[in-house]
Amino acid sequence: MSVRVIRPGLLTTVQDLGRFGHQQYGVSVGGAMDSISLRIANLLVGNASGSAALEITLAGPVLSFDHDALIAICGADLSPRVDGIPFAAWRPVWVRQQSRLEFGPPVRGCRAYLAIAGGFDVPCVLNSQSTYLRANLGGFQGRSLQAGDLLKTGKISEWAQVMIAELSALAGNQGRSEAKWFAGADLCELDLTRPVRVLAGSQFEWFTRASQQAFFSEIFTVTNQSDRMGYRLEGPSLELDHPRELISEGVTMGSIQVPAGGQPIVLMADRPTTGGYPKIAQVATVDLARLAQARPRDKIRFTQISVDEAQQALRTQDATMQRLTSGLVLMVR
């Protein structure tokens, strides 16, 4: 069974939760920019939460299914349609063989995740199916999708078989049928009017008092020079209290570096493994998925929280994911 790419969209890649355990060799973790949406999309089609799905950026692809399929789309609202008919996200959707999935204008957010029952069957490279574009590693031939690509899908779960039976029976002559219920939308916030929560960075004290205050009180704009590697921000210039040298050290997704020009860079999924610029802050893990939905020209503010607050927020998010997982399993018993 397979999915054919008619048009690839702006940037569509295969992603899972990332490639862990190889940073000492310079291999980035990578993986989905918005891991929460990817996990929920997979759960809605009966996959393991970390299965390979498509990460779709702003302008979506056109896809054709060579078999009946169960899909779910989570994350950004990119106006998905099957055979020209819009359908809702955050729920299982049955799609008839030869139906055409396409996307319209982006309404909200930047990245949507398309999961299919069985997952996308691409090679596992260094324990991950994620595409790392800069190294041409993993995913579908190490690159973004192109017209004519044929993506194979894997074996579907018993959960997915139950949903397919229910939804196909409801479809009648239609090319698709969707569940009346939805799940998980409350876990993926697209609202960037709320400040992004951060912890003080390793070199926070190196910056002048005025720069520290400006970082938390001023607005920064996501520039067009932003991608999966990092978001370049535009705002007040942040300065050190005096020139310093920094030996490169480990960085992670959400590290906010400030190069000599004074404009911060938020490192994202395809970040390097080390960095040599002073770090003024670190985005709390619980807010990384929300930040991943920022588009160029979006405005961002930052607010400082403590380590305890960041850990508690993440525990709450994890507990909600656990309840969602358990609830979906019980639905088909």
Image (cartoon, rainbow, N blue to C red):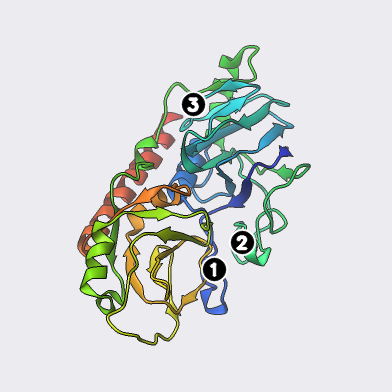
Left or right? Give the position of 270 relative to 259: right
Q: Label 1 sits on what residue type? A: Ser
Q: Residue at x 27, y 65 (%)?
A: 199
Give the label on residue 132, or none. 2
**Residue 7 placement: quadrant:** top right
> Dot 1 corresponds to which residue?
28
Q: Residues within 10 Å of mark 3 (few under 14, many from 20)?
A: some
Residue at the location (39% across, 66% down)?
A: 264
Amino acid carrying label 2: it is Tyr
Query: Percent position (x, y) of residue 150?
Result: 75, 43
C-alpha separation, residue under disc 3 versus residue under disc 2: 30 Å
Q: Is 65 or 327 nearer to us in this picture?
A: 65
How far across and down, in percent of the image, does residue 289 sit?
41, 50
Identify the element where label 3 is drawn. Answer: loop
Relative to 217, 184 lies left or right: right
Q: Earlier in the sequence, mark 1 or mark 3?
A: 1
Q: Front-most of 200 and 178?
A: 200
Q: Look at the image and tell me in which quarter the N terminus lies.
A: top right
Give residue 204's quadrant in the image: bottom left
Instruction: State the residue lying farthest toward the top.
Output: 172
- Residues under numbered marks 1 and 2 in contact, where contact means CB atoms less than 8 Å apart: yes
Residue 109: image quadrant is top left
Identity of the amino acid at label 3? Ala
